[in-house]
Image: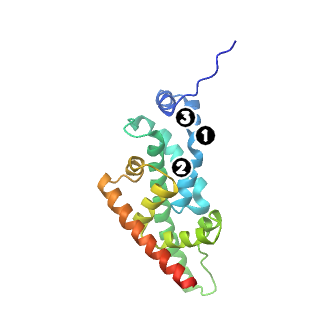
Amino acid sequence: MIPPEVALDDEQFVTRAQAGDLEAYESLVTRHTAAAYRTAVLLGAGSDAEDVIQEAFVKGYRKIDRYRGESSFRSWLLAIVANETRNLHRTRERRNGLVLRAARVQPGSEVAEDDAVGAVLAGERRAALVRALRSLPSRDREVIVCRFLLDLSEDETVTTLGWPRGTVKSRTSRALAKLRGLLSVEEASRG
């Protein structure tokens, strides 16, 4: 009789990956691709989410020796995804600035708004939530996404965003209050 296979946990895969085992890292990638993708999309990567997570996985592999196990591998990896998404936003802002300047020179050109998150989240209530989230400052949006849409624990959110625990707690509270206010205004405007 063949004994049943015992699934390895992340820490065992990380140890093997740190020793140079590419298959172990591929297993980690397979295990966390869905969470990484959701993180990138919900933090605003939109149609570039796959590129963001691919870059995050490459950076994670290059820096696997820096992972010390102080947090879960998942939250360490999602921190890289969050950073890559922030990098994407900075790149988009620079690119959009160039497009807007070019549009002033060529009045016939148009700038299309990124609707990728709206396509992912269906339904009227979800659309209202997305609109409200988009209008929040980026740091408020990031903490709401991590805590409630990605369902990360407080510890995982601290690691993912790289903020002190007190900042995560206070920003979560303030961001929720702002979000509730925005949703109330939208609901009132719909009548």
- Relative depth, front residue between 144 and 38: 144
Relative to 38, does residue 105 appear above or below in the rendering? Answer: below
Report the coloring of the rendering.
rainbow
Which residue, given by chain and number where applicable, does mark 1 sit on?
30
Q: Are marks 2 and 3 in contact (CB under 8 Å)?
A: no
Which of 164 and 148 lies nearest the eye of the viewer? 148
As drawn, the residue found furthest toward the bottom would be 107
Q: Amino acid at mark 1?
A: Thr
Compute the Cα span from label 1 to label 2: 15 Å
C-alpha distance separating marks 3 and 1: 9 Å
Question: Which is in the foreground here, disc 3 or disc 1?
Answer: 1
The residue under the point 63% across, 62% down is 120
Q: Residue 164: tell me if it is visible.
A: no
Q: Secondary structure at mark 2?
A: helix
| Quadrant placement of the N terminus | top right
Q: Identify residue for label 2.
A: 55
> In the rendered structure, which amino acid carries the disc numbered 3?
Tyr
Vertical comparison of 48 with 188: above or below: above
* Residue 140 in which image quadrant: bottom left
- Mark 1 or 2: in front is 1
Q: Reply above or below: 150 against 93.
A: above
List the residue tagged with mark 3: 25
| 2 or 3: tag closer to the N-terminus | 3
* Dot placed on the residue nearer the N-terminal end, 3 or 1: 3
Circle 1 residues within 10 Å: few <14, some 14–19, many ≥20? few
